[in-house]
Image (spheres, rainbow, N blue to C red):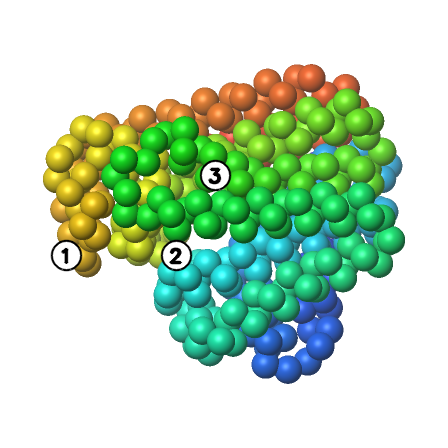
Amino acid sequence: MSTVAGAHQVFAEAVERRLETAVAAHPGTVAAAGAQTLRSGGKRLRPLLVSMCAVDRSRGDRRLERAGTAVELVHMATLVHDDVLDAAPLRRGHATVWRTAGREVASATGDYLFARAFAELADDGDLTAVSLLADACLSLARGEILQRRQAGDPDVTEDEYLRRCRLKTGSLFSAAALLGARFGGVSDRDAHALAAFAEALGLAFQIADDVLDCDGDPDTTGKPLGTDLLDGTVTLPLILAAGRDREVRAVIGRGAAPADVLPTLARVVATGAVADARTRAHRFAADAAAELDRVTAPVDTGALREAVRLASDRSA
């Protein structure tokens, strides 16, 4: 491991400890459920963005650690709430809080994690940082409403899908970059470029994730194929396929039954929609890399470029 990689690893370990402390702050049912969510793991990409978007000399700043913790707590909260809305039994191969504790506890757990996120940032008294995260949370909520409105609609356009992705995924990636830049000694000009980079990275990441739901390995992804198709979430591969195959369009419109999933996904793949969606992910990855070319601050662009590669070529 290089010195820079080692610094990010130290940061990640510090954030993991803070996450455990933040979740356990108020012992009880929701704290236990929050700990269950924390144990299910994850890539922790968003807090790593906080670290990568800071200059090396700032990486030991406790404000960065609190920002990384806050961003990940928001992400965890959205996952718990998504599982409630989708009635999802599994997340990353583990039983969800919704499945083990029920809707009421899961909803309260998501609220608790949101509250703990803002408690982390409030410790610094930086209202601009709090506002950045609050704006991202507002975008997340707007994106979720948009996703519900688009559910089961085969006429959703690619532009409408991308708007939803910018709200649901890009906004929190961008907030992570801006918080890292703010506490990490980066100029406003470079912070703007890093935020644009992070949004494009988030879009590449989300499209790649949607591709995996159609053509991934369930043993690797930790969830069965066709989850989006079953719950009516219209993703880019499904949008592209609906415009090319009447049967795919009909299944989306009427709502898929479990028996529809594998035959429909086979048709989605056969239309070339999965390959074309993967190409779109690579295009956003290229956009992200182009934004990095504008950054003059001594941030870890090597690690950021590797994040781009992993996001667009992901298998889990």
Q: Amino acid at mark 2?
A: Gly
| Labels 2 and 1 touching (C-beta < 8 A) | no
Residue 24 in the image, given as x and y percentages of width and height:
69, 73
| Labels 1 and 3 touching (C-beta < 8 A) | no
Does label 2 or label 1 sit earlier along the sequence? 2
Q: Residues within 10 Å of mark 3 (few under 14, many from 20)?
A: many
Residue 94 in the image, given as x and y percentages of width and height:
43, 66
User: Circle 2 sits in a helix, a strand or a loop, which is it?
Assistant: loop
Q: Amino acid at mark 3?
A: Cys
Instruction: Locate residue 89 relative to residue 153 in the image: left or right.
Output: right
Q: Which residue is mark 3?
A: 165
The structure residue drawn at horizontal position 72% and vertical position 21%, both measured from the top left corner, is 295
Quadrant of the rendered image containing residue 176:
top right
Instruction: Locate residue 63 relative to residue 215 in the image: left or right.
Output: right
The structure residue drawn at horizontal position 54% and vertical position 56%, both measured from the top left corner, is 78
Q: Which residue is mark 1?
A: 259
Does label 1 or label 3 sit earlier along the sequence? 3
Which is nearer the eye, 56 or 26? 26
- How many marks the image carries: the answer is 3
Q: Which residue is mark 2?
A: 222
The structure residue drawn at horizontal position 38% and vertical position 60%, both measured from the top left corner, is 86
Q: Amino acid at mark 1?
A: Ala
Query: How far, Cα to Cα, is label 3 from label 2?
Result: 22 Å
Q: Residues within 10 Å of mark 2 (few under 14, many from 20)?
A: some
- Res 219 label: none
Residue 314 in the image, given as x and y percentages of width and height:
44, 39
